[in-house]
Image (tube, grey):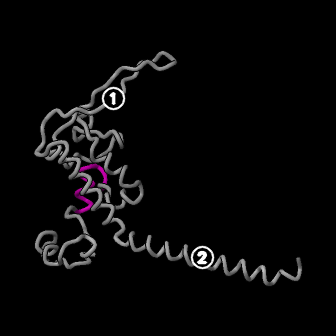
Amino acid sequence: MVEDLGITEEVLKENLMFGTDKPGDTMSIAMRKEDARSYFGTIPPDLSVTSRARGADWLYTFLMTFYLDPSRPFGVNNLQFKGVAMPHVLWELQGLQKAVTEKETLPNGNAVERITHLELETEGQQTPEIYAQTVQDLVNFLVYLGEPVQLKRYTIGSWVILYLLVFLGIAYLLKKEYWKDVH
């Protein structure tokens, strides 16, 4: 797995592992489930599993679209996942965004406010371009972490499809040979 990331085992141990961890161990969070439930009201999602279930594009958009919402317990909401019970953990890097709304009248005459886009209200430690690259790198790592054998599985799948196509040709020729006297 270390080779897949393009780093040496020494770099892995020095920068990404703590205490008694060993290469190949699964990652776990430091927060206990009971603490998470009391802090957030629910256990935070495992974003590596979310990346497998919803895809990298969904996760990227999720991490990019937090905005200020004083009505929420943590003061932020998300365009991708309305009412999410997760704080914006990358706010120091991105800064805080505010929602820019526009009034729209529906065909039935009701007026609603729709969010048209997000604007940066307070600057973060990174520029918007660098933050977008940081989120892209993070999402790519979470996708990899969710299924590290994905590339090998795709390679094996290609070989299986090739085998089935060859077998289909052989089966067709065999069928022609068996049925040549009947037709």
In the picture shown, does residue 22 fall above or below 99? below
- The structure residue drawn at horizontal position 44% and vertical position 73%, both measured from the top left corner, is 155
Within 10 Å of disc 1 (Cα), the crowding (few <14, some 14-19, many 20+) is few
Against 24, residue 46 (above or below) is: above
Q: Amino acid at mark 1?
A: Thr
Residue that mark 2 sits on: 164
- Magenta includes 172? no
Question: Which residue is at 51% across, 19% downward?
Answer: 107
Q: Name the foreground residue: 83 vs 15.
A: 15
**Which element is circle 1 on?**
strand
Residue 20 location (% of width, % of height): 15, 78
Residue at 28% x, 41% y is 65
Q: Residue furthest top?
A: 109
Residue 94 point in image, percent of width and height: 17, 44
Residue nearer the viewer, 152 or 101:
152
Is the N terminus in the top left, top right, bottom left or bottom right quadrant? bottom left
Asked whether, in this view, residue 117 is left or right of residue 128, the answer is right
Q: Residue 72: name its quadrant.
A: top left
Tell me, for residue 116, which label it has, or none. Answer: 1
Q: Mark 2 or mark 1, which is nearer the start of the sequence?
A: 1
- The magenta-colored residue range is 32-43
Give the left or right position of residue 114, taking residue 95 as reference. right
Q: Main secondary structure of the magenta part?
A: helix
Q: Quadrant of residue 35?
A: bottom left
Q: Position of residue 80 (x, y in %)?
A: 35, 42
